[in-house]
Image (tube, grey):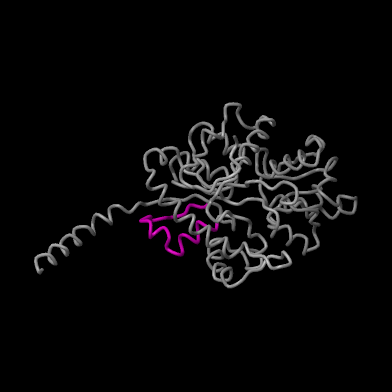
Amino acid sequence: MKRLLVGALLTYCLAQPLAAQEREEITVAALTFVSSVPLFIAKERGYYDEEGLDVTFEFFRAAQPVAVAIASGDADFGVTAFTAGFYNLAGNGALKVIGAQSREEPGFEFSAYLASNEAWEDGLRSPEDLPGRELGMTQRGSSFHLMAGLLADKVGFDLDEVKLTTLEAVPNMISAVSTGQVDAVILPGWIARRVENEGQGHIIGWVHDYTPYQLGGLFTSTRNVEQRPEVVERFVRAYQRGAADYAAAFHQFDEDGERVFGEEAEALIPIIQQYTDATPDAIKGSASYIHPEGGLDVGSVYQQIEWFKREGLVGAQVDAADFIDLGFIESHFNLPE
């Protein structure tokens, strides 16, 4: 018996350095938005540690640099909105989409159409009134550009009837609509509410009411999928646990269909504040829908690519089937036949 105990102890001691060697250092690229929250929950609640992953974050101020960081190998995983630039990188074989980020979903007031005071007084009272007006956005090919295009298709007007003005950054969009330099913009809901509360604009509608769609995704490099699939699996498991915690806290509604934020949400707010610097009210006001298992609306991605191709912003050779990897998460849906 004593010999068995000594042997077991020796085996345990020898195994410890091996376990330490098996830990993987991972860099995650993201924006400090509430839509990135599953990443932060997984970090603060130890889900990465339990998968043997030492995770550090690299934060950016726009979506495109996140995709470039993954494609170049400067980061291992990324979460951000889909853009034309993202799809061109993915179409060239650099990226694999493996899961979902936020989605515009009915009941979740995530992105708002906001009119300037001047345009409001001049009759701009709903998104249907945008033809003949000037809409500010960051850049061509951005998620804001896509949302405007999806709206035009849904409502039935030609996007050329709207003057699209590129303003490079969200703060510039806020300034332009607040001072009447443009008639309207599309902004994250918590920012739009702030502008409206300050008397500098009017919310005229919500994107989820017009064009629900898959805003962004979780992705990695093609190299990681091919050479380190077990690391991808471990990361996905931790991300899914973070997404499930988020959904349990922020997907709750009362019997009247109004969103409610109970103890689970209150417990997560300090974690979210740590990474976003947002106030509790802003967090609740911008808490978008995120699939609790990271399931991707695949059909929406195909739709987005076709729209970008139509606008000449994504190459004709780009095919979503080449870069969406359905093998790491079972909950993807709306799969094209």
Q: Nearer the viewer, residue 169 or 325?
A: 325
Residue drawn at (40%, 38%), measured in percent from left and top?
226
Q: Height in image: 248 above or below 100?
A: below
* Quadrant for the C terminus in the image: top right
Residue drawn at (60%, 28%), measured in percent from left and top?
315
| Picture quadrant of residue 308 | top right
| Picture quadrant of residue 247 | bottom right
**Could you tell me residue 175's position as x and y percent?**
74, 53
Magenta-colored span: 37-59
Question: Is 52 covered by the magenta stretch?
Answer: yes
Question: Is 41 covered by the magenta stretch?
Answer: yes
**Could you tell me residue 5's position as x and y percent?**
14, 67
Residue that extends furthest to the bottom in the rendered view of this protein: 263
Q: Nearer the viewer, residue 181 or 149?
A: 149
Q: Height in image: 60 above or below 312?
A: below
- Horizontally, residue 121 falls left or right of residue 137, namely right
Q: How many labels were placed on the picture?
A: 0
Q: Height in image: 34 above or below 77?
A: below
Residue that extends furthest to the top in the rendered view of this protein: 316
Residue drawn at (60%, 36%), measured in percent from left and top?
336
Residue that extends furthest to the right in the rendered view of this protein: 122
**Could you tell me residue 194's position as x and y percent?**
73, 62
Residue drawn at (84%, 41%), measured in percent from left and top?
131
Q: Height in image: 115 above or below 221?
A: below
